[in-house]
Image: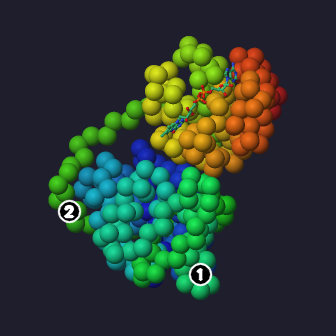
């Protein structure tokens, strides 16, 4: 019996979300007196890292074309791995891959699925998982009654506990299904820091007046090592690419630090960023709704404040080197 984790990778490297899911699975395995096994697919160079996050065994499926993301094939691999390991709980990260694969797997295994869990399950009586609902405005406790349970974990929602385990890594060959759709090629829109995985995000809105003013936002992001994001109208007008748009209709992100510059804080924007650990708002309007969600607020003109922040961070970095 084991807790099985699907550990996704990107260009041969395990993602930050995958390591968090692995850690969640390992903590859960310890809690229910089981062991944590991860399944990885395609070319992955840092599989041993899973040991640091508590995984004792890694099944590596590298046969067939598993480098290109194909949810149908992945669901098949994970279903086989679950059978081989007699897994009672299967854990995903609640990110692109988790959202695409976990529901397919749930249908395949007739398993109950809780998507977007924010805490370890309560296993004292039954199996109940806490998740955020209504864009983080409320919480639900979902009881899973099926014998196999699937959980996708919201990124940045559990505290990591590191270990010194060296995982056993075994090859796992699976007969891949002939699928009705074939993924031929995956093209990345950008090679910049992944927005959904970034710890720090610098985001700006219509208060920036035009695309020509994004230089200072990019500079602030560079000096902090942050990813850049934007509000929806900014992407709609074409000032910034659509893959930067965060919110209800854009990406949902949960960085440790979110800078919101010249963004009003409409509820649809907040829906995608209110899981951020710390929110810093810079806005000329002291009544802007974003200040209600802010941990730190600066009432001021972005064109004045941002260059000063860039200078201050540069000085701080130089002094700490
Ligand atoms: C169904 C639906 C879904 C939506 N989904 C999303 C979504 O996913 N994401 C999203 O972002 N929006 C979404 N929206 C739009 C949302 O309602 C807001 O219109 C949008 O977030 C506003 O963008 P903004 O804050 O950049 O612009 P504005 O509302 O124009 O606000 C600009 C802000 O900048 C401030 N400002 C002006 N000049 C400066 C300056 N020099 N320095 C500092 N501050 C300044 C202003 O005081 C103001 O607060 C959605 C709307 C609908 C109806």
**Looking at the image, can residue 218 be seen?**
no
Q: Position of residue 35 (x, y in %)?
A: 52, 77
Q: Is mark 1 within 8 Å of ligand 1?
A: no
**Placement of the N terminus among the 4 image quadrants:** bottom left
Q: Is residue 5 above or below residue 292?
A: below
Examine the image and state in which quarter residue 282 appears.
top right
* Residue 123: mark in rendering: 1
Q: Is mark 2 within 8 Å of ligand 1?
A: no
The image quadrant where one finds ligand 1 is top right
| Separation of residues labelled 1 and 2 (CA atoms) | 35 Å
Q: Mark 1, mark 2: which one is toward the viewer?
A: 1
The residue labelled by disc 2 is 177
The residue sitting at 56% across, 55% down in the picture is 134
Q: Position of residue 211 (x, y in %)?
A: 54, 17
Determine crowd level at label 1: few under 14, some 14-19, many 20+ residues with C-alpha closer than 10 A. few
Give 166 or 145, whichever is nearer the viewer: 145
């Amino acid at each position: 019996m084991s807790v099985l984790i699907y550990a996704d990778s990107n260009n041969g490297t395990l993602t930050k979300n995958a390591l968090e899911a692995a850690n969640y699975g390992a903590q859960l395995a310890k809690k229910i007196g089981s062991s944590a096994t991860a399944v990885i697919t395609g070319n992955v160079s840092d599989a041993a890292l899973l040991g640091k996050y508590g995984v004792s065994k890694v099944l590596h499926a590298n046969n067939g074309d598993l480098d290109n993301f194909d949810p149908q094939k992945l669901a098949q691999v994970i279903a086989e791995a679950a059978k081989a390991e007699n897994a009672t709980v299967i854990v995903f990260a609640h990110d692109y891959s988790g959202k695409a694969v976990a529901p397919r797997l749930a249908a395949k295994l007739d398993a109950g699925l809780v998507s977007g869990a924010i805490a370890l399950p309560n296993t004292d009586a039954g199996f109940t998982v806490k998740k955020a609902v209504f864009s983080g405005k409320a919480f639900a406790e979902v009881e899973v009654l099926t014998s196999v349970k699937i959980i996708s974990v919201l990124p940045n929602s559990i505290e990591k506990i590191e270990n010194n385990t060296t995982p056993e890594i075994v090859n796992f060959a699976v007969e891949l299904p002939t699928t009705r759709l074939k993924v031929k090629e995956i093209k990345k829109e950008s090679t910049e820091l992944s927005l959904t995985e970034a710890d720090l995000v610098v985001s700006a809105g219509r208060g920036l007046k035009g695309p020509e003013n994004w230089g200072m936002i990019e500079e602030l992001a560079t000096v902090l090592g942050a990813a850049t994001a934007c509000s929806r109208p900014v992407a709609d007008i074409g000032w910034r690419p659509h893959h930067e748009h965060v919110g209800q209709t854009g990406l949902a992100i949960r960085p440790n630090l979110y800078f919101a510059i010249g963004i009003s804080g409409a509820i649809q924007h907040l829906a995608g960023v209110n899981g951020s650990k710390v929110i810093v708002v810079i806005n000329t309007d002291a009544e802007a709704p974003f200040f209600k969600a802010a941990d730190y607020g600066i009432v001021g003109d972005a064109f004045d404040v941002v260059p000063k922040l860039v200078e201050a961070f540069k000085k701080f970095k130089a002094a700490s080197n």
